[in-house]
């Protein structure tokens, strides 16, 4: 199941006009109905009330524009405290935040890194762990996620 480009554009532009970034749009069939999950955030984090407000705005616009074929459920939520980081936009969004990274092979003798994501390079990330910057090739990353809580992979 694919989300149309027009639907993605409307969801992203509406969220952006409200001060939010859309991190993910996932359509799923559950119990015979379509559930459209939208994960949004902003610099300071998104609250439950803000998710509900954005949900209502998106739902009204989607109904007005008749963008969905048949009944659907729209769910707008935050990325949570342990959001997986997989795409370039995920890593850009996480700049300046605490993350946890595991690698397939050792980098500077370690396979697990926890620290602040300082930057992105051409196929690399830079994380500061205990005052030391470490550059990690994206090809070596087995898993990465926000580290606001202690998450295991």
Image (spheres, helix red, strand yellow):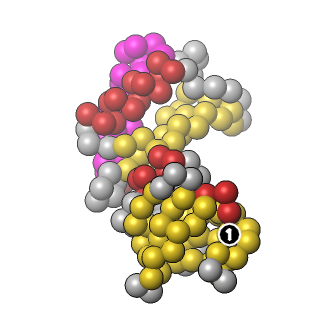
- Looking at the image, can residue 98 be seen? no
Query: What is the quadrant of residue 17 in the picture?
Result: top left
The quadrant of the picture occupied by the N terminus is top right
> Measuring 68% from the left and 69% from the top, which residue is drawn there?
103
Name the residue carrying label 1: 103
Left or right: 31, with 132 as reference point: right
Instruction: Give the quadrant of residue 61.
Output: top left
Question: Looking at the rendering, which quadrant does residue 150 occupy?
Answer: bottom right
Main secondary structure found in the magenta portion: helix
Q: Is residue 27 visible?
A: yes
Q: Is residue 14 above or below residue 50?
A: above
- On the image, the x and y values in percent for residue 29 come to 68, 33
- Classify 10 Å Cα crowding around label 1: few (below 14), some (14-19), many (20 and above): some
Residue range highlighted in magenta? 49-67
Q: Is residue 132 magenta?
A: no
**As drawn, 106 above or below 38:** below
Q: Position of residue 83 (x, y in %)?
A: 53, 59
Q: Is residue 19 above or below residue 6?
A: below
Residue found at the very far left of the displayed protein: 18
Q: Position of residue 9 (x, y in %)?
A: 42, 25
Give the vertical position of 100 relative to 52 (above or below): below
Residue found at x 40% / y 13%: 65
In reply to whether residue 66 is colored magenta, the answer given is yes
- Would residue 21 be found to the left or right of residue 24 on screen? left
Q: Nearer the viewer, residue 7 or 108?
A: 108
Which secondary structure, mark 1?
strand
Tell me the quarter of the image containing the C terminus.
Answer: bottom right
Q: Residue at x 65, y 35 (%)?
A: 28
> How far across and down, in percent of the image, does residue 77 sit?
45, 49
What residue do we see at 37% from left, 50% from top? 41
Residue 72 falls left or right of residue 92? right
């Amino acid at each position: 199941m694919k989300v149309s480009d027009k639907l993605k554009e409307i969801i992203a532009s509406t969220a952006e006009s409200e001060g939010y970034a859309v991190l993910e749009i996932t359509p799923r069939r559950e119990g015979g109905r379509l559930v459209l999950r939208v994960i949004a955030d902003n610099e300071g984090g998104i609250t439950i009330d803000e998710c509900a407000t954005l949900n209502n705005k998106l739902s009204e616009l989607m109904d007005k524009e008749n963008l969905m074929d048949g009944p659907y459920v729209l769910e707008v939520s935050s990325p949570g405290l342990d959001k997986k980081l997989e795409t370039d936009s995920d890593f850009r969004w996480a700049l300046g935040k605490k993350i946890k990274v595991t690698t397939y092979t050792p980098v500077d003798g370690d396979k697990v890194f926890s620290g602040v994501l300082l930057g992105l390079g051409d196929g690399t990330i830079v994380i500061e762990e205990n005052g030391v910057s470490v550059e990690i090739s994206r090809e070596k990353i087995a898993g990465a996620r926000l580290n606001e809580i202690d998450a295991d992979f």
